[in-house]
Image (cartoon, helix red, strand yellow):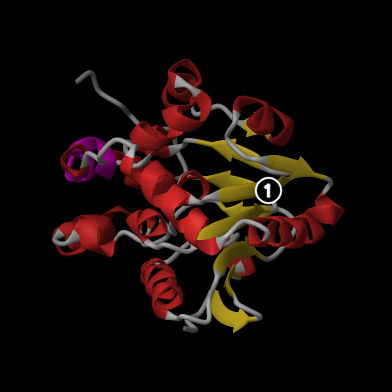
Amino acid sequence: MQVPGLRYTVDDGVASIVIDRPEKANALTMEMYEALNRSLWEAELDDGVELVTITATGDEYFVPGGDLGGGADAWEANVPERLAHVEGDFPYATFERTSKLVLTAVNGACQAAGLIIVLMSDLVVASDRARFRVPEGLRGLVDPFVPVRLPAHVGLARARWMMYTAEDVDAPEAERIGLVGRVVPHAELEAALREAIRAVRRVAPGARERYKRMLSASLPAVRYEEFLAQMRSDEALEGMRSFTEKRPPAWRPA
């Protein structure tokens, strides 16, 4: 499973998904989204795979979000096609549908798509350089996963603060509020991921799978209809135009 910007390999029972697009700060393309989804299903269907890891290359960025470089015109032209089968195309739901635990290591800036990967993963270890943010509202966009998964991690009051202000959360604070499981010095991130793999493997695989199913079943449903309505809105187009034109968005009262 190889596409530009994303690599998938299997070694010693661990499927490794590596996000590697440093020239664009590891921003995800539509091709990378699709490959991430296919990689998770490939790992699920491979009896030789016990665990899945997600990492990113570089020292500054994990995933800052999707690649918005196409601009507002391309966005407006492609919205109907992109959103026609949105639920089935999202890789994030697959994180919870797969029986294999997903372990993610966050090496740097993590927001939008990157933050959703964190929220949907089973275990997360982060570098002390990592920073987390919910920036979608700054572009007139919304995400269907953040409102139903972020409060489960950090509580309703803190989730509201992150969503309504788009303020950064640094790594120590992310660990304190329960957004990530562990924070380590940046140079020790790879070793910490290996140690997490060893720790998980001490737990019986059948027990892990049943725990994951029960936890996933306890989570609220995702509200795709709200996401779809906002993606088609004038606000979303203005957010894209302002991003492309490098200016503040001109929001109008609802």
Image quarter of the C terminus: top left
Residue 27 can be seen in this image = no
Residue 47 at what x, y percent from top left?
46, 80
Looking at this view, is 22 or 251 the one in front? 22
Q: Main secondary structure of the magenta part?
A: helix
Residue 24 at what x, y percent from top left?
57, 63
The residue indicated by pointer 1 is 125
For residue 89, which quarter of the picture? bottom left
Q: Which residues are magenta?
A: 227-237
- Residue 230 inside the magenta-drawn segment: yes
Looking at this view, is 231 or 90 the one in front? 90
Q: Residue at x 21, y 44 (%)?
A: 224
Amino acid residing under circle 1: Val
Report the number of numbered marks.
1
Left or right: where 45 falls relative to 81: right
Q: Residue at x 51, y 20 (%)?
A: 158
Q: Residue at x 42, y 62 (%)?
A: 99
Residue 126 at what x, y percent from top left?
69, 46
Left or right: where 137 falls relative to 23: left
- Residue 58 inside the magenta-drawn segment: no
Residue 156 at what x, y percent from top left?
43, 19
Looking at this view, is 230 or 236 the one in front? 230
For residue 40, which quarter of the picture? bottom left
Residue 146 can be seen in this image = yes
Looking at this view, is 39 or 114 the one in front? 39
Left or right: where 54 falls relative to 227: right
Is residue 2 positioned above or below 58 on the image? below
